[in-house]
Image (tube, rainbow, N blue to C red):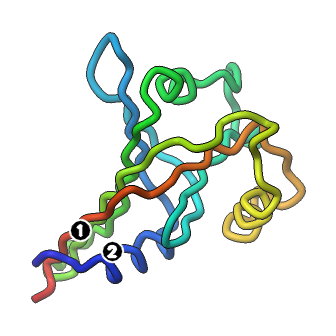
């Protein structure tokens, strides 16, 4: 069953994790699990220094320089298929540099994810949400 925009937005905002999809010019989509925060109009994905990384110059950031469009997929899976659902948000990057970071996104990420308490972010990718679609197994 298709979900309406209000329900899609609500599920997106309350979801705990998502899959961010970006598209490099030389191959198919790059998909990566991400932490994020969202409002009805924007989403923010951190590039953190909490989890181990070889570098904070991540491929997703380079992909977004080439093409600022992305997709964020959130979902719920359960063996009870009537409770399955997914929401896909179409995104467009609006800020990707330290000077473009907004303090409220940093704080919202720290509140939603306790391991980020006291952490600094290498960057916070801020996106405009350009559309949402969703589906639910519940009738």
Residue 8: assigned label: 2
Q: Which residue is drawn at 21% across and 78% down?
A: 3
Q: Give the vertical position of 43 relative to 139 (above or below).
A: above
Front-most of residues 27 and 126: 126
Circle nearer the N terminus (2, 1): 2
Rendering coords of residue 89 (x, y %) = 36, 57
Q: Percent x, y for residue 113?
A: 69, 64
Q: Which residue is drawn at 53% across and 24% down?
A: 65
* Left or right, residue 74 beside residue 118: left
Q: Do the residues labelled 2 and 1 touch (CB within 8 Å)?
A: yes
Indicate the quadrant where residue 96 lies: top right
Screen quadrant of the C terminus: bottom left
Q: Is residue 2 above or below residue 71?
A: below
Q: What element carries label 1?
A: strand
For image coordinates 72% across by 67% down, the residue present is 108
Q: How many marks?
A: 2
Q: In the drawing, what numbered circle is on residue 66?
A: none
Query: In screen coordinates, is 136 left or right of 104?
Result: left
Coordinates of residue 123 in the picture (x, y in percent):
73, 39
Disc 2: CA contacts within 10 A as few (<14), some (14-19) or many (>=20) = many
Q: Residue furthest right?
A: 118
| Callout 2: SS | helix
Foreground pick, 69 / 114 = 69
Relative placement, left or right, of 116 versus 87 is right
Residue at left offset 52%, top offset 41%: 93
**Image quadrant in which you'd find residue 77:** bottom left
User: Which residue is identified by label 1?
Assistant: 134
């Amino acid at each position: 069953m298709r979900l309406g925009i209000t329900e899609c937005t609500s599920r997106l905002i309350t979801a705990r994790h998502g899959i961010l999809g970006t598209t490099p010019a030389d191959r198919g989509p790059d998909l990566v699990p991400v932490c994020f925060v969202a409002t009805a109009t924007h989403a923010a994905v951190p590039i953190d220094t909490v989890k181990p990384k070889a570098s904070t110059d991540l491929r997703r950031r380079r992909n977004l320089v080439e093409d600022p469009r992305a997709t964020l997929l959130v979902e719920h899976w359960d063996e009870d298929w009537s409770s399955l659902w997914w929401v896909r948000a179409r995104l467009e990057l609006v800020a990707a540099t330290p000077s473009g970071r907004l303090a409220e996104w940093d704080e919202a990420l720290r509140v939603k994810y306790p391991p980020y308490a006291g952490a600094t972010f290498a960057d916070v990718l801020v996106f405009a949400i350009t559309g949402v679609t969703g589906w639910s197994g519940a009738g």
